[in-house]
Amino acid sequence: MAVLPASLHVDLSLLRAAAGANSATLASEDEFKNRFPDCETGAMPPFGNLYGIPVFADESLSRDKEIAFNAGSHRELLRLAWDDFKKLAEPRIAKFATGRMGSIAA
């Protein structure tokens, strides 16, 4: 599970390297929704560790005091101190996020 700011994108080659994996691809919601049976599809919280999924957090998040995320539904948002999230999710912190693609030139 990759956790990063919503304003950024995952660089799959950087994530692959951080995970020590041979490959990295984005999974569709249909491919992983059954791993989170108590959550609405697309509103999974960033606690993959509770579901047997390793968590990777982009290093940019560590510069923020808080992290905000869906709390298992599209109606509830949870804000948590970054330090508390780090203790609970035990993510591997790495640089794998990149700026938005396709920005409009003036």
Image: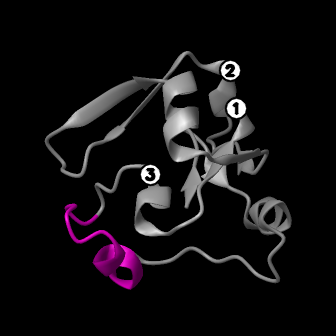
> Vertically, is 24 above or below 89?
below
Using the numbered discs, state the Cα–Cα distance from disc 2 to disc 1 in whole angstroms. 6 Å
> Label 3's element?
loop
Quarter of the image for the N terminus: give it: bottom right
Residue 79 at x, y percent in the picture:
35, 25
Residue lying at 18% horizontally and 48% vertically, measured from the top left: 74
Using the numbered discs, state the Cα–Cα distance from disc 1 to disc 3 in whole angstroms. 18 Å
Q: Which residue is mark 1?
A: 60
**Can I make out residue 90 in this image?**
yes
Name the kind of residue labelled 3 in the image: Phe
Residue 36 at x, y percent in the picture:
30, 69
Q: Which residue is mark 3?
A: 47
> Which residue is at the front of the view, 78 or 91?
91
Residue lying at 55% horizontally and 15% vertically, measured from the top left: 65
Residue bounds of the magenta highlight: 30-41
Using the numbered discs, state the Cα–Cα distance from disc 3 to disc 2 in whole angstroms. 19 Å
Q: Which residue is mark 2?
A: 63
